[in-house]
Amino acid sequence: QAQFVESGGGLVQPGGSLKLSCAASGDIINIFTMAWYRQAPGNDRELVAHITRSGSTYYRDPVRGRFTISKDNAKNTVYLQMNSLKPEDTAVYYCNRPLSGVLVRDSWGQGTQVAVSS
């Protein structure tokens, strides 16, 4: 199993920006689709965005146009640039390798907390 270390979260005002990073163990970023997920208090974990091996991307409707997923194969790192943040983006953000539907391939890391509040 791969392991992931997420970082870059914090407290930001509405309209602000953050860039999250996900460092993966092993040389997997250039082989597998990678995804960012988030879990808000009281809610199920949900897919936010994914990026395929070839670099194709998908975004959940509420974040499309505001978030950008990217990756650096040489650094085994996936990024999530988040702009125009809203209070409803507040959640713990995780990365993982999607398997099917809501299933993922690996154990969850510790995540990184994003709080959007004035």
Image (cartoon, rainbow, N blue to C red):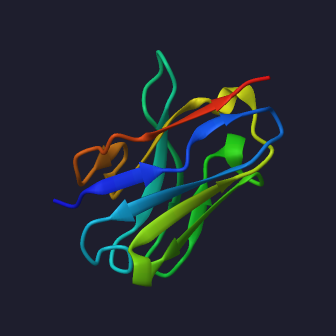
Spot occupied by residue 14 in the image (x, y as percentages of width and height): 80, 32
Image label count: 0
Front position in the image: 11 or 91: 11
Spot occupied by residue 32 in the image (x, y as percentages of width and height): 34, 72
Front position in the image: 3 or 48: 3
Spot occupied by residue 80 in the image (x, y as percentages of width and height): 59, 57
Spot occupied by residue 54 in the image (x, y as percentages of width and height): 49, 82
Residue 3, compared with residue 14, is above or below; it is below
Residue lying at 47% horizontally and 71% vertically, measured from the top left: 52
Residue 41, compared with residue 46, is above or below; it is above
Residue lying at 45% horizontally and 56% vertically, measured from the top left: 35
Image quarter where the N terminus lies is bottom left
Task: Answer with left or right where residue 52 lies relative to residue 4.
Answer: right
Extreme-left residue of the structure: 1
Task: Answer with left or right where residue 46 lies relative to residue 89.
Answer: left
Residue 39, compared with residue 107, is above or below; it is above
Residue 12, compared with residue 106, is above or below; it is above
Which quadrant of the view contains residue 33? Answer: bottom left
Extreme-top residue of the structure: 42
Residue lying at 52% horizontally and 25% vertically, measured from the top left: 40
Task: Answer with left or right where residue 40 lies relative to residue 53.
Answer: right
Which quadrant of the view contains residue 108? Answer: top left
Image quarter where the C terminus lies is top right
Front position in the image: 21 or 44: 21
